[in-house]
Amino acid sequence: RVTGIVPGGVDSHTFEPIPSDIKTLQAADLIVMNGLDLELPTLILAEKVKKATASILQLGNRALKEEDWRYDFSFPREHGHPNPHVWLNIELVMRYVEIIREALTALDPANRAAYQANAATYLGKLQKLDQAIFACIETIPEKNRKLVTYHDSFAYFAPRYSMTVIAAIQPSD
């Protein structure tokens, strides 16, 4: 069973867990987060209240080496928090799937075949999406592959798909 604690439509950068989230975190066998400091208040709480046998899986921290973390205008290196928007790079999302599959298999080896099958199905869909993005980008002349975005969230997407982020404009959260 998967239970999310960040409500839909809530900015995960500013989300603060509420007291009822403690019960969810205490009951978890595996706590899965994006990582790269995106969910710091939740991580701090989870580390305090999780049961001793539960693991915290920070996907971005596992999918990327620290030297591959990206910093930019909204996430400057001097503040120490890398850009956490890893999931926009489909190759890295596929890594997330593999990391989750392995964690679930280690936690529940009796259902290994189901985790393998589900991951394979999802990885197939992600591979098609990755190819479709490449095909779409190919229709844009190289000199025009520039992005102006609302939020600095394309730090991992842009290099994967030969794009350049030239600005991010976000007046407020």
Image: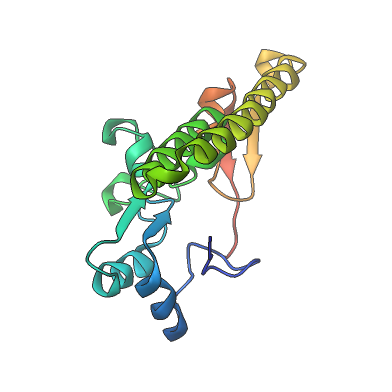
Q: Position of residue 78 (x, y in %)?
A: 27, 49
The residue that appears at 33% across and 39% down in the rendered structure is 62
Is residue 155 visible to us here? no
Position of residue 16 in the picture relative to residue 9 (left or right) = left
The residue that appears at 32% across and 73% down in the rendered structure is 45
The residue that appears at 66% across and 16% down in the rendered structure is 143
The residue that appears at 28% across and 51% down in the rendered structure is 80
Q: Quadrant of residue 158?
A: top right
Q: Position of residue 73 (x, y in %)?
A: 44, 46
Residue nearer the viewer, 139 or 35: 35
Position of residue 127 in the picture relative to residue 44 (left or right) = right
Residue nearer the viewer, 121 or 155: 121
Color scheme of the displayed model: rainbow
Is residue 43 visible to us here? yes
- Tell me: residue 33, above or below residue 89: below
Q: Quadrant of residue 26?
A: bottom left
Position of residue 76 in the picture relative to residue 18 (left or right) = left
Q: Position of residue 71 (x, y in %)?
A: 38, 41
